[in-house]
Image (cartoon, rainbow, N blue to C red):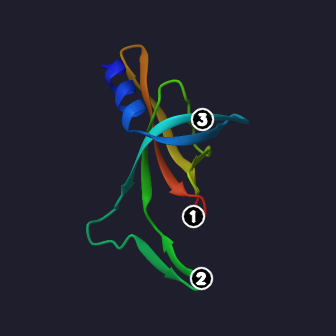
Amino acid sequence: MTKGIARAIARYGLAVTVEHGGTQTGSRALLQPIRRERTEEPFEPTPLGAAERRAWRYLGAADTPIAQGDRVRCGERSFRARRAEAVCAGREIAYHWAVLLPEEDA
């Protein structure tokens, strides 16, 4: 099971940099926007333009830890982990899961 998840992340994941424990690690991760409610608009008007309100789901490689407060960069975007944990299959870490907020909202 863990090898299948690792292959999916390696093949379909985006290039990310995770800043964890004072180090930066390049990796790959699957990122998906999360809508809190079906009727919710993904953007909120502000004096400086539209601000994104969505949180993002992060599924990352087993060998790249992430914790609450860590920064994740993907292209020009920067996020902070609001919640994070390792997901295990038996005694082995299968992948890392997190909820990310755009850095300006974190």
The amino acid pointed to by label 3 is Gly
> Does residue 17 appear left or right of residue 60 in this picture?
right
- Marker disc for residue 105: 1
Q: Residue at x 51, y 41 (%)?
A: 15
**Which residue is most to the top?**
91
**Which residue is most to the front?**
11
What is the crowding at mark 2: few (fewer than 14 residues within 10 Å), some, or many (at least 20)? few
Residue 39 location (% of width, % of height): 27, 72
Which one is closest to the eye, mark 1 or mark 2?
2
Looking at the image, residue 64 lies above or below residue 54: above
Q: Label 1, label 2: how many angstroms apart (C-alpha)?
A: 14 Å
Which one is closest to the eye, mark 3 or mark 1?
3
Which one is closest to the eye, mark 2 or mark 3?
3
Residue 72 location (% of width, % of height): 58, 46
Q: Earlier in the sequence, mark 3 or mark 1?
A: 3
Residue 63 location (% of width, % of height): 53, 24
* Residue at mark 2: 48
Q: Label 2, label 3: how many angstroms apart (C-alpha)?
A: 32 Å
**Which residue is most to the right?**
22
Q: Residue at x 39, y 70 (%)?
A: 42
The amino acid pointed to by label 2 is Leu
Locate residue 65: give its quadrant: top right
* Residue at mark 3: 26
SS class, disc 1: loop
Q: Which quadrant does the C terminus fall into?
A: bottom right
Q: Earlier in the sequence, mark 1 or mark 2?
A: 2
Residue 95 location (% of width, % of height): 43, 28
